[in-house]
Image: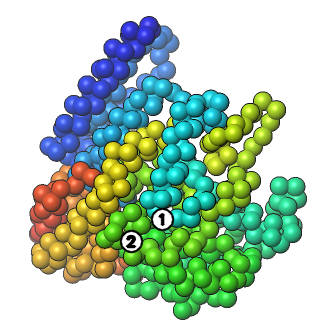
Amino acid sequence: MTIDGTQTLLRQAVEYGCEYLGSLDERPVVPDAQALAALGNFDESLPAQPTPPADVLQQLHRLGSPATTANAGGRYFGYVNGGALPAALAGRVLADCWDQNAALQLMSPVAAKLESVCERWLVDLLRLPEESAVGMVSGTSLASLCGLLAGRNALLTRAGWDISQQGLFGAPALRVVMSSSAHATIRKALAMLGIGTAQIELVPADAQGRMDAKTLPPLDERTLLLVQAGNVNSGAFDPFIPLCEAARRAGAWVHVDGAFGLWARASAATQQLAEGVDRADSWSVDAHKTLNSPYDCGLIICRDRGTLAAALQANDAYIHFSGGRDGMLYTPEMSRRARGVELWAALKSLGRTGVDALVTQLCQRARQFAVELGAQGFHILNDVVFNQTLVACEKPELTTRTLENVQASGECWCSGTVWRGQPAIRVSVCSWMTTADDVRRSVAAFAAAREQAKMRNT
């Protein structure tokens, strides 16, 4: 294919994309049975001969677009999935055309420059220590792994153990102290780092899912303390000041799981929720959640640049580091796409006041859900402090059936969870697209789904 042919194909892709985005308000939030059945047309043997690229693209749009979940729209409230800001989406399209490898400055000067700018902007916006380093990874799962890796290595180094030479086997034992409500990705990251459940000490959480600082066990210089900015169910924030101060006195390492909640630092209306979080050592956060950068764009932030780089650096004779930013120093990957392009576009397009307004808007929509669902007789189970609203009906069975009906309706989509031993509906407001009318429309779907469940029960 020639460059002219490639340009024609890209224009067609953009046309299909615009058609898709234009249909979001009318289409079901989840694909219907017909769209799901049509996915079977992808089940074919690998073609023996090439397929014209235009036919490939047309099939993707014809079969794929109807079978997507419309989390780019305003009525998807599942799994803390954000939307995609216009400038960030367009920036990603351009970056994909550039096809840059962001491992080294020598590979892509523009990727290195934009990552460097984003690092400075993010540290300032989130009001974290000025010297902090930022690595751009796929998501918070990997970012948490990086932060805990840096913490593990730092604690072992302080104990006189050089893990890069001596390895992990036979190393001094470490402790992990974390909340009983910690996210599953934290347990996964710990397991990947060779830290088993026998080394984990759980601290009870209060009724909102916050770690109870009064029950914190004594910490020491071999402790990883994990705290949370935004409980995945309730949106609650741990009390960072007493927890971080206890860790500092003991010489422990503090990592913050701030997947969506760390962005509270960027809004005047919510910054008090994360007061003291800057006293930690490392932070994981997603730009593709609250900030609404396209997937995948996670961030590992570490107070000590050298510690993060030492934990992640790879070297060889053919690798030539520059005097500027070499992104592979702060990520596990070497070859990776230039995530900093759309991140820069998101931050540049919003500016400080725009990020503040976006975070504030998401929280306002979550509170609107709580008020309007409460007026309909639903039980609101949490203090709605950020973008999460937990909902239940008067009986557990009714909650479960109502959720099933909401999900099947196509009007909106929420996920289920278990909160304090009972089923609950988890409403996560994450998209810049969600309007007050979207919330009202979704509340009406909730009410209809509950009535349908009651009729079925009788």
Label 2 and label 1: CA atoms lie apart by: 10 Å
| Secondary element at image label 2 | helix
The answer to which of marks 2 and 1 sits earlier in the sequence is 1
Question: Residue 264: image x %, image y %?
Answer: 39, 67
Above or below — where is 413 with respect to 214? above
Q: Position of residue 36 (x, y in %)?
A: 30, 39
Image quarter in which the C terminus is found: bottom left
* Badge nearest the viewer, 2 or 1: 1
Front position in the image: 383 or 250: 250
Which disc number belongs to residue 127?
1
Give neighbour class at mark 1: few <14, some 14-19, many 20+ (Cα, 10 Å).
some
Q: Quadrant of residue 37?
A: top left
Q: Position of residue 248 (x, y in %)?
A: 65, 79
Left or right: where 209 falls relative to 17: right
Mark 2, other Cα within 10 Å: few <14 / some 14–19 / many ≥20? some
- In this rendering, does residue 221 appear at all? yes
Residue where numbered disc 2 is placed: 271
Q: Please, is residue 75 above or below residue 385 in the view?
A: above
Determine whether 228 is above or below 139 in the image.
below
Q: Is the C-beta separation of discs 2 and 1 under 8 Å?
A: yes
Given residues 301 and 11, the one toward you in this image is: 301
| Residue 7 coordinates in the image, percent (x, y) | 37, 15
Report the amino acid beneath label 2: Gln
